[in-house]
């Protein structure tokens, strides 16, 4: 079985993330969308909320499963017997950091490959940070995230 891991904080998941997930789901038998569990990093959504929202967003992909990990990503990849780490590249500015991470992961385990996938052009500018900022300021975010995420953001910022 060809298994890939797509890691991230997904706070919140965007249409750009979902585009990368859909592309990966066509290439691999199983895609594990792995939410990084980091106690020192405070997100807008709790870890449990992110798990719930991401599961709703990918429920129509039978070979995509939402999971979690702590610690080194490469250790998690080994634990779940995956062969590939999926990373999204939106722009050249992403490349340097992602390239460095891919090389470090390869140094830690040369059996783990990193595959870079580019989202559709319409999502290249999209980030969770920008979506949260637009939502916080009362802007329309329906074009950037699934409906369930837009509702959750509106609810979060209406408090």
Image (tube, rainbow, N blue to C red):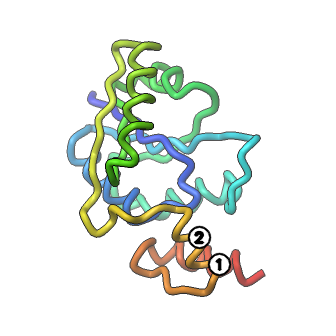
Looking at the rendered structure, the secondary structure element under dot 1 is helix
Identify the disc placed on residue 83: none
Mark 1 vs 2: CB contact within 8 A: yes
Q: Dividing the image into 4 quarters, which one contains the N terminus?
A: top left
Choose between 59 and 125: the one closer to the eye.
Answer: 125
Choose between 67 and 109: the one closer to the eye.
Answer: 109
Asked if residue 131 is positioned above or below residue 89 in the image, the reply reads: below
Relative placement, left or right, of 79 versus 91 is right
Asked if residue 29 is positioned above or below residue 152 in the image, the reply reads: above
Q: Residue at x 29, y 57 (%)?
A: 119
Mark count: 2
Task: Provide residue 151's location: percent of width, then percent of height.
Answer: 57, 79
| Classed neighbour count for the residue bearing mark 1: other residues with Cα under 10 Å, few (<14), some (14–19), many (≥20) | some
Q: Dividing the image into 4 quarters, which one contains the C terminus?
A: bottom right
Q: Residue at x 47, y 61 (%)?
A: 127
Relative placement, left or right, of 23 versus 142 is left
Asked if residue 157 is positioned above or below residue 49 in the image, the reply reads: below
Farthest residue to the left: give it: 27
Cα–Cα span, label 1 and label 2: 6 Å
Looking at the rendered structure, the secondary structure element under dot 2 is helix
Residue that mark 1 sits on: 136
Q: Residue at x 59, y 41 (%)?
A: 36
Relative placement, left or right, of 117 versus 31 is left
Residue that mark 2 sits on: 132
């Amino acid at each position: 079985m060809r298994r890939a891991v797509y890691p991230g904080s997904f706070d919140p998941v965007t249409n750009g993330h979902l585009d990368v997930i859909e592309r990966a789901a066509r290439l691999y038998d199983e895609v594990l969308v792995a939410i990084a569990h980091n106690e020192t990093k405070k997100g807008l959504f709790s870890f449990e909320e992110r798990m719930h929202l991401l599961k709703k967003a990918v429920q129509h992909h039978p070979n995509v499963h939402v999971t979690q990990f702590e610690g080194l990503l490469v250790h998690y990849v080994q634990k779940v017997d995956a062969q590939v780490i999926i990373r999204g590249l939106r722009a050249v500015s992403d490349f340097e950091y992602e390239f460095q991470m891919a090389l470090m992961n390869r140094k830690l385990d040369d059996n783990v490959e990193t595959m870079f996938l580019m989202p559709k052009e319409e999502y290249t500018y999209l980030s969770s940070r920008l979506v949260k900022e637009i939502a916080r300021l009362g802007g329309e975010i329906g074009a950037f995230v699934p409906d369930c995420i837009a509702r959750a953001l509106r609810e979060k910022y209406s408090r």
